[in-house]
């Protein structure tokens, strides 16, 4: 199967990039299953039902998230009803929504697990490593593929996690930093891995936001409201082809100034 993974979609600019680039990319690459991280898709912080529906209408099968999943208040009204929208699985069990889902495509069962790291994230979540272990034991005999979005800040935590689940997960991709890494690889036991997919959003920005605002925050130390940057846009993604005989992985970058 061919899997297309899309880096964090940042606001209206990121959605504009999706609308322009994704249809032709689907025609060219013919992915069987598409995953996008959408936790910043509505105004740069969180996701709404309208934006969720917009992303799904473009052919995306599953939307993962991270620490911004609760930023839009209306999320509590629909997250329990949307099986294709995931929040990190290592939130407490009483949290709304679901941390993983099992989806069927081409007679194959695909498990997508959304997990959040703990280093520098400032949220007291359960251990992502043990959370994966618990889910893996639950699903390993009933699915054909296991894919993990590890939403984390520290590259060391992401890489350690990749090796920890090597041979158990089929794909591990990192999100959150919005900066793509050049370390796409097949780990020793066969897991396709990248530390961070990158963002889908404004070309000239600070991780998707207007440049002047983060600069002012760094210069003054004062709290600054961030707005999604506009102008040219880019698409960061990852294409993974995996079957019984081989695994191939390739980064995708498309840009329009």
Image: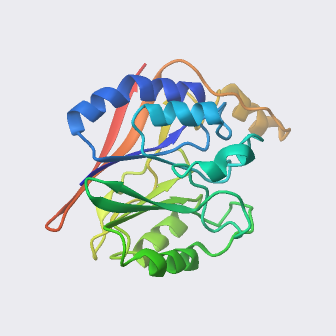
* Along the line of sight, the residue nearer the viewer: 186 or 35: 35
Q: Can residue 10 be seen in this view?
A: no
* Along the line of sight, the residue nearer the viewer: 135 or 123: 135
Q: Can residue 243 be seen in this view?
A: yes
Taking the image as shown, residue 84 lies to the left or right of residue 171, namely right
Counting from the top left corner in percent of width and height, residue 10 is at 57, 34
How many numbered discs?
0
Counting from the top left corner in percent of width and height, residue 35 is at 42, 47
Quadrant into which the N terminus falls: bottom left
Rendered image quadrant of residue 125: bottom right
Counting from the top left corner in percent of width and height, residue 33 is at 33, 48
Q: Is residue 166 above or below residue 212?
A: below
Residue furthest to the left: 245
Query: Residue at horizontal 16%, vertical 64%?
Result: 246
Quadrant into which the C terminus falls: top left
Colouring: rainbow
Counting from the top left corner in percent of width and height, residue 18 is at 44, 29
Q: In this view, does 227 lie above or below 93?
A: above
Q: In this view, does 53 lie above or below 256?
A: below
Residue furthest to the right: 222
* Along the line of sight, the residue nearer the viewer: 242 or 80: 80
Query: Residue at horizontal 43%, vertical 75%?
Result: 139
Query: Residue at horizontal 37%, vertical 73%?
Result: 142
Rendered image quadrant of residue 31: top left
């Amino acid at each position: 199967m061919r899997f297309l993974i899309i880096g964090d979609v940042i606001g209206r600019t990121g959605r504009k990039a999706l609308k322009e680039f994704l249809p032709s990319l689907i025609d060219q690459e013919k992915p069987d299953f598409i995953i996008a991280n959408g936790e910043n898709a509505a105004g740069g912080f969180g996701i709404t039902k309208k934006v969720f529906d917009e992303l799904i209408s473009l052919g995306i099968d599953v939307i993962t998230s991270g620490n911004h999943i609760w930023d839009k208040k209306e999320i509590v009204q629909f997250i329990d009803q949307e099986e294709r929208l995931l929040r990190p699985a290592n939130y407490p069990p009483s949290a709304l929504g679901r941390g993983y889902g099992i989806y069927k495509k081409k007679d194959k069962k695909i498990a997508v697990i959304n997990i959040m790291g703990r280093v520098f994230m400032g949220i007291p979540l359960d251990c992502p490593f043990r959370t994966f272990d618990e889910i893996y034991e639950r699903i390993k005999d009933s699915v054909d593929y296991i894919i993990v979005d590890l939403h984390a800040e520290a590259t060391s935590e992401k890489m350690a996690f990749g090796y920890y689940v090597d041979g158990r997960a089929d794909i591990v991709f990192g999100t959150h930093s919005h900066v793509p890494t050049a370390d796409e690889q097949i780990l020793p036991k066969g897991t396709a891995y990248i530390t961070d997919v990158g963002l889908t959003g404004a070309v000239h920005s600070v991780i998707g936001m207007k440049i002047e605002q983060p600069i002012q925050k760094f210069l003054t130390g004062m709290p600054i409201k961030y707005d999604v940057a506009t102008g040219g846009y880019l698409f960061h993604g990852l294409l993974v082809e995996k079957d019984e005989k081989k695994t191939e992985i390739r980064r995708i970058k498309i840009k329009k100034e």
